[in-house]
Amino acid sequence: MRVTLYAAYGTNLDPARMSERCPHSPLRGTGWLEGWRLTFGGEEHGWDGALATIVQDPFEQVFVALYDITDDDVAVLDSWDSADTGLFRKTKVRVATLTDEVVAWVYVLDAFEGGLPSATYLGVLADAAEAADAPADYVADLRRRECRSTFGG
């Protein structure tokens, strides 16, 4: 069975969520996408606002969880994250860990940057980052981000 390295930066940061979705793909560790920033886009595609994605930015970094993911679990994750519909595409990135630098793939939204996530979605992202042991200041920054009101806008 083939295994590749997947870097999660959104709701898949949560190890419990990933173990439910992809039971054959263990958490390997965490790291940082240096030269990338977390942003939102594709507001017209989200169920309640814009969706998380990453874009290159030389002055930023994004916390990620690294998973050794099997081909079977990739197919499941593609469905969960709508990559099988073309909403997200995969790209390879370098992830800095405490001990080295590794190459992993990530999902990147195939839509224009812009729009606001819902308060609910942003809360789920912050909770996922906290569950993955992201630094407290990173989680706090997520919780302070501008968002759409949960009640209509």
Image (spheres, rainbow, N blue to C red):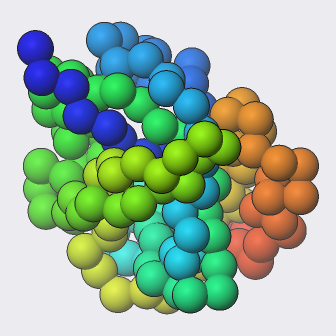
Seen in the picture, residue 130 relative to 2 is either above or below; the reply is below
- Residue 83 place in picture, x, y as percent: 20, 52
* Residue 128: percent from left, percent from top: 65, 39
* Residue 66 point in image, percent of width and height: 47, 37
Query: Left or right: 16 with respect to 103?
Result: right
With 152 as the anchor, is 10 left or right in this view? Answer: left
Residue 13 lies, in percent from the top left, at 56, 39
Q: Is residue 32 above or below residue 13?
A: below
* Up-down relation of residue 37 to residue 16 (above or below): below
Give the camera-side residue of 55 and 146. Answer: 55
Q: Quadrant of the C terminus?
A: bottom right
Residue at 36% over, 62% down: 93
Q: Say whether residue 65 is visible.
A: yes
Q: Residue at x 27, y 60 (%)?
A: 92
Q: Is residue 17 above or below residue 122?
A: above
- Please give the name of the residue rendered at 46% of the width and 46% of the height, measured from the top-left corner: 8
In the picture, residue 46 is in which quadrant? bottom left
Q: Nearer the viewer, residue 43 or 149?
A: 43
Of the 4 image quadrants, the one containing the N terminus is: top left
Give the camera-side residue of 103 and 19: 103
Q: Quadrant of residue 144?
A: bottom right
The residue shown at (75%, 44%) is: 134
